Image (cartoon, helix red, strand yellow):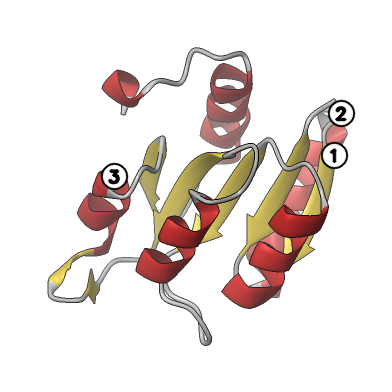
Amino acid sequence: MACILIIDDDPELRDIMRRVLEGAGYTVLEARTGREGLHHCQTSPIALVITDMFMPDHDGVDLLRALQTCVPVPKIIAISGGGRLRNRDALVLARELGANRVWQKPVSMIDLLTTVRVLLAGDGDASAR
């Protein structure tokens, strides 16, 4: 099955998402920071990244730009509890920077599984955001 990377500084949210995704048969890696997440993308074939837009060491803008340089470029789900980055709504900015899906926290685990399946099946083009 595909490898999914969860990047979020909230250990409880990472743990819940990891357990749900592993229960569905996916391989899951976790990162607490954007820098740690980028390292995983550069050293492992990652099919999908689920990332928070606000983290201590990297904001979502820098992270999403860096993810676009990974080979292959992973599908991306950007999540946020709300807020602005660089004077813009974080999730609007995430869409503009290539996120395939954007979600406001809290994240429904049913929606998570459904969206992951759609994106990894290849049906997750930008028009479906």
Number of marks in picture: 3
**Amino acid type of the residue tagged 2 in the rendering:** Gly
Compare marks 2 and 3 and give the one earlier in the sequence.
2
62 is higher (above) or lower (below) than 119: below
59 horizontally vs 19: left or right: left
**Amino acid type of the residue tagged 3 in the rendering:** Arg
The residue labelled by disc 1 is 22
Q: Nearer the viewer, residue 41 or 127?
A: 41
Q: Position of residue 113 (x, y in %)?
A: 63, 29
54 horizontally vs 121: left or right: left
* Quadrant of the image occupied by residue 127: top left
Which disc is residue 95 wearing?
A: 3
Q: Of discs 2 and 3, which sits in the foreground?
A: 3
Q: Nearer the viewer, residue 36 or 18?
A: 36
Q: Nearer the viewer, residue 97 or 88?
A: 97
Q: Position of residue 63 (x, y in %)?
A: 48, 65
Q: Of discs 3 and 1, which sits in the foreground?
A: 3
Compare marks 3 and 1 and give the one earlier in the sequence.
1
Q: For numbered disc 3, what is the local secondary structure?
A: helix
Q: Position of residue 108 (x, y in %)?
A: 52, 41
Q: CA distance from mark 2 to mark 1?
A: 5 Å
Can I make out residue 50 in this image? Answer: yes
The residue labelled by disc 2 is 25
- For the point 50% across and 78% down, the residue is 55
Q: For numbered disc 2, what is the local secondary structure?
A: loop
**Amino acid type of the residue tagged 1 in the rendering:** Glu
Q: Position of residue 79 (x, y in %)?
A: 43, 55
